[in-house]
């Protein structure tokens, strides 16, 4: 069965997730919390960039970069579907030459959640 990636939409979902556990590094901050309902077919993940990061082009570039890494992590089954994730991007994630390092740190952080 194919996995569907679902983004958080409600404000209360974000507030609830921010009360969960937190992992931080130089590229992003990741909040995660165990899902209470038993529907583990969907991956609940949201990627957030602040306006401080730059204009819309830079923010969307950063989101696309993180989405591609999440898709790779899903294919390699590094993600735990029992958790809901929120990723807050930092300024260092915009650097052009840091993609491989970003990939390594993201996969390491997802392994810590397991």
Image (cartoon, rainbow, N blue to C red):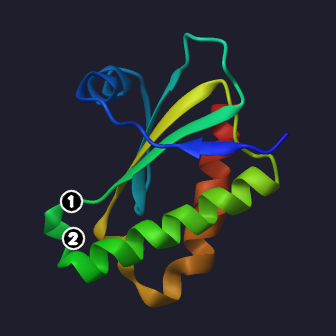
- Identify which residue is drawn at 72% across, 30% down: 41
Q: Secondary structure at mark 2?
A: helix
Q: Is residue 112 left or right of residue 22?
A: right
Residue 61, disc? none
Residue closer to the observer: 93 or 51? 51
Proximity of marks 1 and 2: CB atoms separated by less than 8 Å: yes
Task: Give x and y (percent) for residue 84.
Answer: 52, 30
Task: Give x and y (percent) for residue 83.
Answer: 59, 27
Per the image, the residue denoted by label 2 is 53
- The image quadrant that residue 114 belongs to is top right
Task: Give x and y (percent) for residue 109.
Answer: 60, 47
- In the displayed structure, 25 sits above or below 94; it is above
Indicate the quadrant containing the N terminus: top left, top right, bottom left or bottom right.
top right
- Identify which residue is drawn at 29% across, 80% down: 58
Task: Give x and y (percent) for residue 80.
Answer: 70, 33
- In the displayed structure, 27 sits above or below 45; it is below
Disc 2 residue crowd, few under 14, some 14–19, many 20+, Cα 10 Å: some
Per the image, the residue denoted by label 1 is 50
Q: Is residue 14 left or right of residue 6?
A: left
Disc 1 residue crowd, few under 14, some 14–19, many 20+, Cα 10 Å: few
- The image quadrant that residue 70 belongs to is bottom right
Q: Residue furthest front?
A: 1
Q: Is residue 90 left or right of residue 113?
A: left
Question: What is the number of callouts on the image?
Answer: 2
Q: Is residue 51 left or right of residue 19?
A: left
- Identify which residue is drawn at 28% across, 82% down: 57
- Identify which residue is drawn at 47% across, 71% down: 64
């Amino acid at each position: 069965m194919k996995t569907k990636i679902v983004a958080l939409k409600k404000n209360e979902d974000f507030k609830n997730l921010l009360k969960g556990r937190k992992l931080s590094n130089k590229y992003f901050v990741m909040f995660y919390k165990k899902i209470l309902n038993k529907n583990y077919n969907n991956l609940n993940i949201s990627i957030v960039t602040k306006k401080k990061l730059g204009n819309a082009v830079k923010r969307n570039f950063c989101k696309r970069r993180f989405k591609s890494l999440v898709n790779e992590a899903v294919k390699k089954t590094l993600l735990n579907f029992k958790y809901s994730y929120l990723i807050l991007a930092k300024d260092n994630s915009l650097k052009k030459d840091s993609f491989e390092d970003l990939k390594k740190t993201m996969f390491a952080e997802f392994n810590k959640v397991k």
